[in-house]
């Protein structure tokens, strides 16, 4: 090929606009693809203070008018935003003299733009399904949800290949939209180990002393305080652990269950052992993850489980519930501890095991870090993704569109 | 031998007749074919109609919305636009990219026309039948505002507007501040109305400035 492979990423969020997990995902994926010799353009929604056009970390970012006129509801806003996204991307591709190889859409939020661009330029479209409406809502109950579900189905139908971040999501998406198996690819989500390596040589003694006594171990929970994240299971495990080990339990995050959880803690008479920090900034979070003697992910439902990966990257041992994406990330007794879902006794057993056995904790910590570097490394993920682009372009070159 | 190829977007076309637009477009399309214009009509399909047929030399493509469930006319129209766009792109590639102009009736398929203009450099004419301002009697709910924003986009991006009366031209100017010279008044069934529409197609294709 005489020029670099060129991809246009379509995403409704991109830093500094961060709504959920798609924003960091698209950022790290694009950056790593650019490092792997690809030309990457990102078309995304605008954000106050962020430039309309910029070159960051080797990729070109275009922020378009994300439709600020009033719309009757969120879904209609999404489709109207897609009109603008499609228009601006079409102008960009035209300016580039059509020298674009693939369009890559992230979730239904950019479905119609991706589908339209595919047909006007006759280039292959790939879609990453980060989540599904049927999964988020635990079923399809209303016309609004059905419309989104059908839009997702349409996107997966039009996509040349559909990418999911875990085997769990591959089988879920396959079931939800009735896709043939060979249309789906699993490429894991990644974690950036560099940000934790930077903090490696810092002395965290003083930082730690703000959260726990020197003789207390730190048990960390990070997540939204909502039912499916299982913070209540975590709190119920506290007295069971304290019977065997001295520790401080730190809960990072907010959510509708916060009041309920803190009154539960007060009722147990353990307010001095459990600390609710609310939201913390990235730097504080990373330091906490590095200080933690164990990080706990007790989710009841989890499509991927990025918070477990982050803990592993921070070289903290992890205890996770055996469900969804977490089941794949952690191998029991090798890269972490798996416990029964929604079971405080099992969770307390896992936490205690790590706290009381330093040799065991060090073993899983070391194995987990190695696994993160090998499997959840952005450079490797970019290579896998580029491999999928090349495979698709190989098939495309034999089609009448080529 | 055709002198040019034009695609007409209309959300109603016989046998699917909702108002007076369907027959107006059919008559125009047939007349243009007689004047050696290659005419492709892209419209909405329902269970009564074929997906493709050719009558009086007019090639008609009818598209179906892949999203069957909707919460309102806006989500229905916006998703249907992708299929209109796909049909137009398929026509474009099937005639070796020789599509000279797209004529869009009302706001429904403006988004598709705008993308095709930006992507494939096909200019479009916005044939204004009515305005949301009059249909909704000045209501400004988010629903009306969304439709008005699509009308505005069409007027901004169109190479030319065709309106059916001087009153409509003045109203379009009043509501959207479209320059007067960008608008052509061609009353339906007036003398030489199809010839005058063809002249407008030619002007746009040749990139002529508004008269």
Image: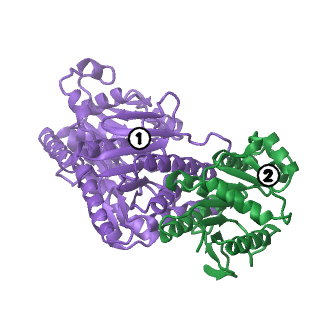
Looking at the picture, does residue B74 appear above or below residue A201?
A: below
| In the displayed structure image, the side of residue B19 where residue A292 appears, left or right | left
Is residue B195 among what the camera can see? yes
* Residue at (67, 60) in percent of width and height: B103
Q: Residue at x 80, y 46 (%)?
A: B172
- Seen in the image, is B163 located left or right of residue A204? right
Mark 1 neighbour class, 10 Å CA radius: few under 14, some 14 to 19, many 20 or more: many
Badge 1: chain ID: A
The quarter of the picture where residue B57 lies is: bottom right
Q: Which residue bears the numbered disc 1?
A: A223
Inter-mark Cα distance, 1 to 2: 50 Å
Badge 1 and badge 2 in a common chain = no
- Image coordinates of residue B71 in percent, x first then y, are 67, 60
Determine if residue A301 is in view: no
Is residue A89 or residue A235 the one in the foreground?
A: A89
Q: Quadrant of the C terminus of chain A?
A: bottom left
1 vs 2, front mark: 2
- Quarter location, residue B106: bottom right
State the residue position of label 2. Answer: B131
Q: Which one of the lettered chains is coloured green?
A: B
The color chain A is rendered in: purple
């Amino acid at each position: 090929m005489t020029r670099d492979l060129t991809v246009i990423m379509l995403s409704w969020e991109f830093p500094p606009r961060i709504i959920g997990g798609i924003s960091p995902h698209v950022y790290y994926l694009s950056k790593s693809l650019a490092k792997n010799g690809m030309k990457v353009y990102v078309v995304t929604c605008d954000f106050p203070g962020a430039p309309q056009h910029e070159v960051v970390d080797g990729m070109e970012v275009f922020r378009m008018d994300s439709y600020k006129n009033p719309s009757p509801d969120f879904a209609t806003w999404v489709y109207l935003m897609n009109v603008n996204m499609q228009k601006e991307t079409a102008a960009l591709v035209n300016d580039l003299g059509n020298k674009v190889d693939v369009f890559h859409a992230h979730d239904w939020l950019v479905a119609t733009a991706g589908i339209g661009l595919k047909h006007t330029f006759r280039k292959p479209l790939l879609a990453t399904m980060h989540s599904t409406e049927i999964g988020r809502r635990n079923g399809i109950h209303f016309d609004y949800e059905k419309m989104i579900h059908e839009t997702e189905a349409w996107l997966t139908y039009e996509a040349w290949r559909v990418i999911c971040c875990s085997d769990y999501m591959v089988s879920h998406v396959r079931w939800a939209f009735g896709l043939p198996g060979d249309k789906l690819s699993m490429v894991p989500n990644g974690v950036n180990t560099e940000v934790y390596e930077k903090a490696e040589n810092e002395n965290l003694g003083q930082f730690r002393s703000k959260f726990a006594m020197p003789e207390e171990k730190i048990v960390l929970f990070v997540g939204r305080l909502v039912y499916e994240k299982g913070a209540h299971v975590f709190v119920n495990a506290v007295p069971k652990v304290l019977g065997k080990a001295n520790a401080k339990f730190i809960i990072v995050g907010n959510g509708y269950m916060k009041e309920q959880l803190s009154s539960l803690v007060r009722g147990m008479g353990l307010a001095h052992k459990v600390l609710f920090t609310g939201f913390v900034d990235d730097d504080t979070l990373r330091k906490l993850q590095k200080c933690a003697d164990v990080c706990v992910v007790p989710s009841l439902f989890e499509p991927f489980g990025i918070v477990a990966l982050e803990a592993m990257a921070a070289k903290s041992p992890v205890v996770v519930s055996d469900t969804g994406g977490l089941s794949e990330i952690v191998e029991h007794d090798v890269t972490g501890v798996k416990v029964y879902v929604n079971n405080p006794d099992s969770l307390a057993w896992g936490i205690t095991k790590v706290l009381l056995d330093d040799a065991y904790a060090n073993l899983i910590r070391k194995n987990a870090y190695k696994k993160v570097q090998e499997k959840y490394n952005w450079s490797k993920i970019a290579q896998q993704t580029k491999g999928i682009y090349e495979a698709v372009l190989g098939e495309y070159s034999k089609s009448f569109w080529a | 031998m055709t002198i040019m190829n034009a695609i007409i977007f209309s959300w109603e076309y016989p046998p699917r007749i909702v108002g007076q637009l369907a027959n107006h477009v059919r008559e125009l399309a047939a007349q243009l074919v007689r004047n050696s214009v290659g005419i492709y009509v892209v419209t909405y399909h329902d269970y009564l109609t074929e997906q493709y047929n050719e009558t009086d030399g007019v090639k008609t493509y009818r598209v179906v919305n892949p999203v069957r469930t909707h919460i309102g006319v806006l989500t229905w129209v916006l998703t249907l636009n992708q299929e209109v766009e796909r049909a137009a792109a398929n026509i474009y590639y099937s005639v070796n990219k020789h599509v000279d102009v797209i004529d869009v009736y009302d706001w429904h398929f403006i988004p598709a026309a705008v993308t095709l203009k930006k992507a494939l450099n096909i200019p479009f004419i916005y044939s204004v039948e009515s305005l949301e301002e009059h249909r909704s009697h000045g209501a400004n709910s988010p629903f009306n505002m969304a439709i008005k924003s699509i009308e505005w986009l069409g007027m901004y991006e169109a190479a030319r507007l065709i309106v059916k009366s001087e009153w409509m031209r003045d109203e379009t100017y009043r509501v959207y501040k479209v320059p007067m010279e960008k608008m052509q008044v061609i009353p339906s069934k007036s003398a030489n109305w199809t010839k005058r529409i063809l002249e407008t197609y030619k002007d746009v294709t040749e990139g002529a400035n508004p008269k």
